Amino acid sequence: MLRFSLVCNVFAVDAMDMPYLNANLDSLDAPNFRKGCNYAAAGSTILPATATSFCPFSFGVQVNQFLHFKARVLELRTGKGGKKLDKYLPADDYFQKGLYMFDIGQNDIAGAFYSKTLDQILASIPAILSEFESGVQNNDLTIPTKIQQLG
C-alpha cells in the first residue's frame, strides 16, 4: 500500500535537485532542516491506527511528531549555542511562513474496500474529514487563510 504520491515526491525531489527532507531531529548525522522536514509514512491513514493497520503512523502521530520537532527546534535555537545551529535549523518565523502540504486519506478509503460495504465507506468519510480538520486546527498548525478558504 505504498502511496503513489510518496513515490512521485521522491522523483520530484530528484528532478528538482532538492535535498531529501528528514523528519528525525535527533538522527546520528547532522541533517539540515532549513528547507523543511517530512513526516510522510507509506500506508498511513488519517484515522488512528488499529492492531490490523498497515502503518502505525496515522495523521495524529505525524502531527504530534511535527509538534515535537517544532518545540525542540525552538528550544535548541533559544538555548546556549543555538547560534551554531543556524545552518541546520529553520528560523523561528519559518513555522509561521512555511508551506504545509498534506497528502493523506487515500489509504483510509482504499483499505476500507477490503472489509466494508460501499455504504459503510461513504458513512466513514465525515469521520475521516473530521479527524483531518481536528489535526490541523487543534494542533497549532498554521494554515494560511487562502488555503483554509478553499476547503
Image: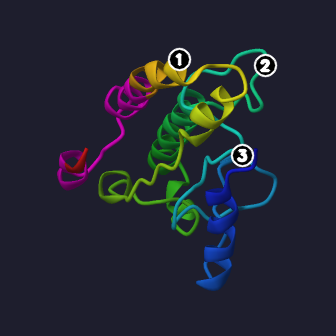
Q: Main secondary structure of the magenta part?
A: helix
Q: Nearer the viewer, mark 2 or mark 3?
A: 2
Quarter holding residue 47: top right
In the picture provided, is 92 more to the left or to the right than 48?
A: left
Q: Secondary structure at mark 2?
A: loop
Ranked by sequence position, the earlier of labels 1 and 2 is 2
Q: Identify the mark at residue 120; answer none if there is no mark.
A: 1
Q: Secondary structure at mark 3?
A: loop
Residue for badge 2: 52
Ranked by sequence position, the earlier of labels 3 and 1 is 3
Residue for badge 3: 42
Residue 11 sits above or below residue 131 on the image: below
Residue occupying the point 22% across, 50% down: 150
Q: Nearer the viewer, residue 11 or 63?
A: 11
Alpha carbon separation for disc pair 1 and 2:
18 Å
Residue occupying the point 31% across, 31% down: 137
Check if residue 62 falls in the magenta segment. no
Q: Secondary structure at mark 1?
A: helix
Q: Are marks 3 and 1 in contact (CB under 8 Å)?
A: no
Q: Quadrant of the N terminus?
A: top right
Crowd class of label 3 (few under 14; some 14 to 19; many from 20; radius 10 Å) = some
In the picture provided, is 11 more to the left or to the right than 60?
A: right
Q: Nearer the viewer, residue 79 or 137?
A: 137
**Where residue 4 sits in the image (x, y, percent)?**
67, 58
Magenta-drawn segment: 129-149
Residue occupying the point 66% across, 37% down: 44
Tell me the amino acid under the disc marked 3: Ala
**Where residue 49 sits in the image (x, y, percent)?**
67, 21
Q: Nearer the viewer, residue 8 or 76?
A: 8
Tell me the amino acid under the disc marked 1: Gln
**Where residue 121 sits in the image (x, y, percent)?**
53, 24
Check if residue 133 falls in the magenta segment. yes
